[in-house]
Amino acid sequence: MPKIVTSKGRMRRQSEPTIVGDEETPKNVNSWEEFEKELRAIQKRLRRTNPEREPHLLFRGQEDSCWPLETTLERSGRDGMLFSDYYRLISVVRPQVESLIGLVWDKAPEYSEVRESMANPGEFSVDIVNVRGFPAYDYMVYLRHHGFPSPLLDWTRSPFIAAYFAFQRCNDDRKMVSIYVYCEHPNRSKRLPRYEPLIISHGPIVRTHRRHFLQQCEYTSCLEFKSPVRFAHHADVFAQAKRGQDWLWKFNIPSSERLKVLKFLDAHNLNGFSLFGSEESLMETMAMRELEFREKDYVRQKGLSDKQ
């Protein structure tokens, strides 16, 4: 985890045109192969920035390029929710969740303890980022993977897994899907701005549902450490495009690439069943192979034979 350094002033805007400062300036590519080429260029650039280590990139796929980058908590209409209110909410439902599924999060701090620690927003921010991390992080990840509104924005370390989520349910060839590429700290350090939203990364080492590992997940949250501490929009941080941290690229790919990409991924055993491991995802994978991949191959082959 990078060391967080307090900053008193606003940093200068990033002037690199390839870095997306807001979601209105994505880069459209014409094919999956063109996206891969762009990704290699990003990796090469980051290696030049910091030759001593491999760049740590996170990826997120969305099936509609018009969708904003939002958490499920924001999508539920709870913009700017107080951290204390959200923690109280998940504390209230925890006994029910534990009783019904047979798991216990006995190391999760009590609501009163978290509320007390938030009395000093500055100390609370340092505690979250540099010391203990998010309170009840493992419980929050479990809730995120099972549909409870969450302030965690989920990413994957694999561009191919991001591609699966981008293309899987997009059936309109007129649309474009999006893949986001995020690098939190290209230079290994990160500044903590006062009175401005801050994106916090939450790493992969957590004991939680198996999907977290199958999907190579990591997460980010965005908080504003004023009093009272509240959740903020990731887009507010990306719009500032600060030099040396929180670099974001957004690539739009034609959804007409869908079958080609999904067949490529399935050939490398990356499909719904490998990512979810459920009976429902097995049926979904079998249906895709038989009803989409092979049927389209049959139609294509028949068309070729008819022309001969």
Image (cartoon, rainbow, N blue to C red):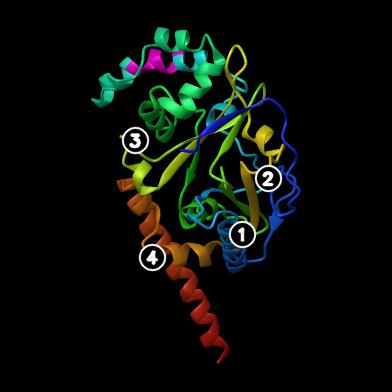
Point out the stretch of residues depicted in magenta: 88-94
Q: Amino acid at mark 4?
A: His
Q: Which secondary structure, mark 4?
A: loop
- The answer to whether residue 133 shows anywhere in this view is no
Question: Does the magenta-highlighted stretch encompass residue 91?
Answer: yes
Q: Which residue is mark 2?
A: 66
- Frontmost of labels 4 and 1 is 1
Residue 268, numbered label = 4
- The answer to whether residue 137 shows anywhere in this view is yes
Report the quarter where the C terminus lies: bottom right
Mark 3 vs 4, N-terminal side: 3
Mark 2 vs 3, N-terminal side: 2
Q: CA distance from mark 1 to mark 3?
A: 31 Å
Q: Which secondary structure, mark 1?
A: helix
Q: Residues within 10 Å of mark 4 (few under 14, many from 20)?
A: few
Mark 2 vs 1, N-terminal side: 1
Q: CA distance from mark 4 to mark 1?
A: 28 Å
Residue at the outermost bottom position = 308
User: Which residue is at the front of the view, 35 or 201?
Assistant: 201
Q: Looking at the image, which residue is at 47% across and 74% down?
A: 297
- Frontmost of labels 2 and 4 is 4
Q: Are marks 1 and 3 in contact (CB under 8 Å)?
A: no
Q: Which secondary structure, mark 3?
A: loop
Q: Residues within 10 Å of mark 2 (few under 14, many from 20)?
A: some
Q: Amino acid at mark 3?
A: Val
Whole-percent x and y of residue 298? 46, 75
Q: Which residue is mark 3?
A: 206
Whole-percent x and y of residue 261? 51, 64
Q: Amino acid at mark 1?
A: Arg
